[in-house]
Amino acid sequence: MAKVFPFRGIMFNESMKNQLGDFLCPPFDVVDEDSKNYLYSLSEYNVIRLENGKINDKDNGEENKYSRAADLFNDWLNNRTLIQIERPCFFVLEESFDIQGVNRKRRSLISSVNLYDYKEKVILPHEKTRKKQRNDRLKLMKATNANFSPIMSAIEDKDSKLIDFLAEETSSPPEFQGFIPNMHEFKMWIIDDAEKISFLTKLFEDENIYIADGHHRYETALEYRELINKENSSRMMNLISMNDEGLLLLGYNRAFSGLSYEKLELIKNELNEYFIFSNTTWENSFYESNYYDEDKIIMVDNDNSSILRLKESFNSTYEALHAAIESILSPEEIINHIKYEHDSKEMKAKLDSNNLQLCFFMNALSKNYFIDTVSRGKLLPPKSTLFYPKLPTGLVIQYLE
């Protein structure tokens, strides 16, 4: 079903490969101002300058972070800081990271993937997007004619063909390797062998592709195709097997602030329709709740802790919780008063400091639930999944011209 191809990726000059980790950054939507300042100071070649540069007070329609990214991108191409590979290739990425005291590896295939409207049911989304973020990405694509950040995607890979291929490829010495500051270690291989390329292009023909992280970037690519360049019909993606033990699907916690006492009590009462409550005392093990897929939530306010177990008539804790919330709060109240947190310890500290009113320590969704639900065309509630860790930006760049 999916059409997957090699492409002429752009990479940092091989002479700079020993510093490559210092040039990379996380995706645009997880870089706050403090992180951005750090990345700027890390290296004059850090790709944050292209992916999500600083905003200046004097910015206008002509001079802004998008025009600066375009100028810098062209400069780096012209002075060969960045070099476009002469022949179409696939790229293999292996990431190594520690989580809960265990070292894991995740392998992915960096590819060019044909664009499909969601109604074609080849590329499958699981969440809604927001216009502000889509507009931001579109302005960058229009200015630079490039994609700096891949979309993290997964395939079911029932026959394990992808995961077996990637395991074999990564058994040889890598072409590039390094450490991404504040992220993790990586290794890279380049595939230009005709036989391997043929195998990979055929491998995906019977697969759907599930967007794990990057819905805004994918929908921006669709809009760019329609508005700017109808000939451009592909988007760079990192494709991962759902069988990969390094593909972690973690939960997103919910933090409430600024609501009236009456609204909070209405929400708690409404939750009785969806969950079975049992009182508990806080345990440090609750910090790890978003790593496990048992259908229970830990609800904590400043005085009490409760375990909420899902009633049998509901499919997931996320759906049940959001059904309860949406029956009490307006969409505007949800946006203004609920934050989505992955760092459980930081959220609990804010709660203990009275900066939050109520917190839900969420569970992780199982991969089987994710595949089954998304395959049926159903969107999940906002921030139901965190595919961890985030992919690095800047290892390979896709030029759209």
Image (cartoon, rainbow, N blue to C red):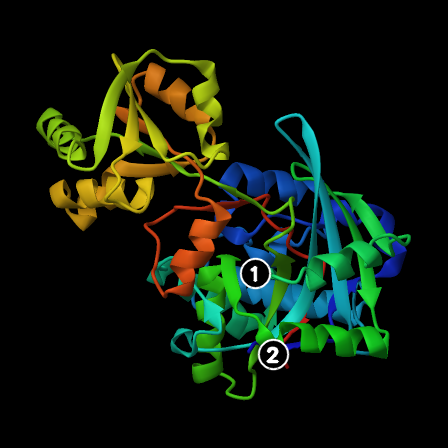
Q: Quadrant of residue 178?
A: top right
For label 1, the residue is: 156
Residue 346 circle label:
none
Q: Considering the image in quadrants, where does the N terminus appear? A: bottom right
Amino acid type of the residue that numbered disc 2 sits on in the rendered structure: Lys
Residue 400 placement (x, y as % from top left): 62, 77
CB atoms of marks 1 and 2 within 8 Å: no
Instruction: Looking at the picture, tell me which residue is in the foreground, 27 or 99.
Output: 99
Question: At 91% from the left edge and 52% from the top edge, which residue is drawn?
Answer: 173
Amino acid type of the residue that numbered disc 1 sits on in the rendered structure: Glu
Measure the C-alpha gap from mark 1 to mark 2.
Answer: 15 Å
Q: Quadrant of residue 53?
A: bottom right
Question: At 45% from the left edge and 66% from the top edge, which residue is drawn?
Answer: 124
Earlier sequence position, callout 1 versus callout 2:
2
Is residue 25 positioned above or below 284 on the image?
below
Mark 2 element type: loop
Q: Is residue 126 visible?
A: no
Residue 288 placement (x, y as % from top left): 49, 26
| Total numbered circles | 2
Q: Quadrant of residue 3?
A: bottom right
Is residue 290 positioned above or below 155 on the image?
above
Question: At 62% from the left edge and 54% from the top edge, which residue is drawn?
Answer: 49
Instruction: Looking at the picture, tell me which residue is in the foreground, 133 or 250.
Output: 250
Q: Is residue 344 left or right of residue 72?
A: left
For label 2, the residue is: 3
